[in-house]
Amino acid sequence: MVSNQDVAEELEVGVIGSGYAGMAAAITLAQRGIPVTVFESAKQLGGRARGVIYNDTQLDNGQHLLLGCYHDTLRLIEMVGGNIEKDFLRLPLQLDLHRQFSLKAPRLPAPFHLLTALLSSHGLSLAQRLSAARFMLKMRLANFTLPSHVYGRGAGGEGIDITVAQLLAAHQQDDNLILKLWEPLCIAALNTPIHKASGQVLLNVLRDSLTRSRADSDMLLPRIDFTALFPQRAASYIEQHGGQVLTSNGVEQIAVHDEFIELNTAQGASKYSHVICATPPTVAANLLRPIAALSNTVAAIDSLEHQPIYTVYLQYPASVRLPCPMLGLHQRISQWLFDKGQISGQHGLIAAVISAEGIHQNLPQDELAQKVIAELREEFGIANTPLWVKVIAEKRATFCCSPNLARPTQLSPLPRLLLAGDYTAGDYPATLEGAIASGIKCAELIT
């Protein structure tokens, strides 16, 4: 019998990218005693969920909301030394579109907390609330799967996916209900407009977050930046377990040989039994393109459409605050607002998030910031002028989560080379949980 120790001695893994997917893979391997080296081209760990400093203020490159159902993410944060109750502001499920719609789940067992929240929500007629509740009950009875006898099957026998807009229309969800409930939920979860978004993936999110355990629907707002939350702690864990995390050390070429894979950087070349490519999809495609055996994988990555996320940070005087830590705006450019004073003690700092494609993409950043400032003045009477403003535009923040999307699998045609990232095959859209799950799967495939 071969022991774990014997296996570990035969393996040495290189991980390209220090985002949540790469670090999840690396610490899972390190926990098994497998030597691992993480290569990061930037000075900062975290990839597309990282901390940044501006005007001596700690920010993130974008606001990320975690849910209680992100079990793998929360488990790994704790594994590397985090404390969930200290690191996050935990709120029960609540959606608040300022002066237009509000929903808050009571502390009841699932799914009664959701049904009670829907039926007692404000801003919808009784008929609309009943319609939303019926929709959720029907989806629960269907196990949150699009029934093939209704929507048909593909050539391979698989169920045919449809857009969120088509799904909602099929279940008579009216325009007001869509605008105030389903569209904000879809964009927040999938970062994709409802006319492009996958109905089945949205159902996967609703299934896991709203119907299994009441705590799964809790919203967790990080009190610390996204580099400190996980990647920085993961780096310490990896080093304590004999691995390395190399920043400012980007991989420039992957050379595949029969018995090993060579990674070439500006600092030199190194050989590994296995390599996990955990970079953003466009970077992965460029690294993999010279490898003939991966032409289909590269084609699948190239075919992905991308969606942006813009975050407008506004530093007001410390006395400025919003009615609650997080709330939305109805049919405004700003979609979700985060009061960092109430979340992380950064008083007067407000983050306005604008997800998915839209007219904001065509605005100069100064003009976009002024429109957000005007919306805050009109909605909340904030007459103060911000002390400073910072717009962070992630133009390829996520993949466009469309129906029947052929996402590349973690195991490539070359068994020693694996892919990790939220864009790889899985039930979830581009979320931290999807990224973490892909990294864990890659690590588990290495034996």
Image: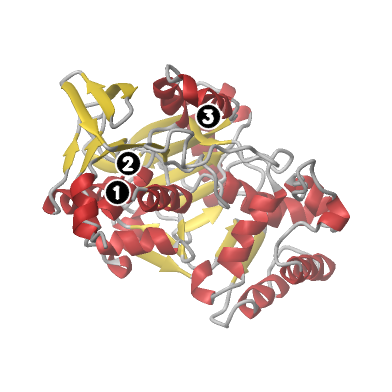
Q: Secondary structure at mark 1?
A: loop
Q: Name the amino acid, label 2.
A: Arg
Q: Which residue is mark 3?
A: 297
Q: CA distance from mark 1 to mark 2?
A: 7 Å
Q: Residue furthest bottom?
A: 108
Do the residues bearing badges 1 and 2 touch, measured as CB atoms within 8 Å? yes
Residue 293: x and y in percent read 48, 24
How dense is the environment of label 1, judged by Cα within 10 Å: few (below 14), some, or many (20 and up)?
Answer: some
Q: Is residue 356 above or below residue 85?
A: above
Task: Write down the quadrant of residue 131 in the picture.
Answer: bottom right
Query: Which disc number belongs to residue 50?
Result: 2
Q: Residue furthest front?
A: 1
Residue 223: x and y in percent read 31, 57
The residue positioned 26% from the left and 32% from the top of the image is: 40
Is 437 situated left or right of 447 in this image? right
Is 143 situated left or right of 376 in this image? right
Foreground pick, 426 / 374? 426
Q: Name the amino acid, label 1.
A: Asp
Query: Which disc number belongs to residue 225?
Result: 1
Q: CA distance from mark 3 to mark 2?
A: 27 Å
Q: Quadrant of the N terminus?
A: bottom left
Q: Is residue 401 above or below residue 96?
A: above
Foreground pick, 337 / 431? 431
Is 212 situated left or right of 435 in this image? right
The residue positioned 47% from the left and 31% from the top of the image is: 281
The residue positioned 60% from the left and 36% from the top of the image is: 400
How dense is the environment of label 2, judged by Cα within 10 Å: few (below 14), some, or many (20 and up)?
Answer: many
Residue 173: x and y in percent read 82, 57
Lower sequence index among marks 3 and 2 = 2
Foreground pick, 377 / 280? 280
